[in-house]
Image (cartoon, helix red, strand yellow):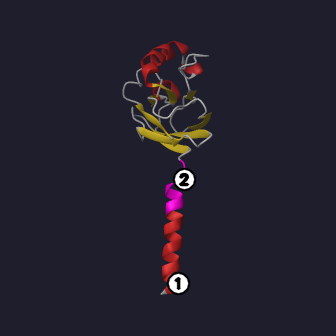
Amino acid sequence: MKFFLNLLVAVSVFSFAHATQAACSFDLEVGDYLKFSSTDMTAEKSCESVTVNLIHSGKLPAKIMGHNWVLAKTADVQALATAGMSAGLAASYVPAGDDRVLAYSAVIGGGEKTSLTFSTESLVSGEAYTFFCSFPGHSYSMRGVFNVAS
């Protein structure tokens, strides 16, 4: 009986430690549709960097149904999506050198995956951030909230 009580305490401590661990890495899936597998991400400010792993489970090529992951302040999303259309596929539909872009991945097509890692140094807890796909026409439905917890 004492063994099982000690085991229960050990599992509880491990579960609590695991549950309070900072969210510094996220896996997102996209496909041949206009949707991210998650529309809400929360990173802890204690993370020095955040990694986003994007997996395209569809079959269509990037030039037809490509997706990427772009992070910006919510107020800048529409302007960036519009500017990104002119940047083209080779630039991942992201305007070069635009300071409003906080992080972005390459555009990927069916069966591909990509990862990006970015610093949390400039991110502020309580600021409104949005992640979105900048492929032309996708940003209207492919977006989500990116939170920074203190």
Q: Secondary structure at mark 2?
A: loop
- The residue to which callout 1 is attached is 3
Does residue 128 appear left or right of residue 107 in this picture? left
Highlighted magenta segment, given as a residue range: 16-22
Residue at the spot x=55%, y=38% of the render?
112
- The residue to which callout 2 is attached is 21
Q: Secondary structure at mark 1?
A: helix
Determine which of the numbered discs, if any, sits on residue 12 in the image. none
Residue found at the very far left of the displayed protein: 141
**Foreground residue among 62 and 94:** 94
N-term-proximal mark, 1 vs 2: 1
Taking the magenta stretch, the answer to whether it contains residue 80 is: no
> Where is residue 93 shown, x and y percent of the image?
53, 20
Residue at the spot x=56%, y=44% of the render?
24
Above or below, comparing residue 50 to residue 98 in the picture: below
Q: CA distance from mark 1 to mark 2?
A: 27 Å
- Residue 101 position by quadrant: top right
Give the amino acid type for the residue marked by disc 1 in the picture: Phe
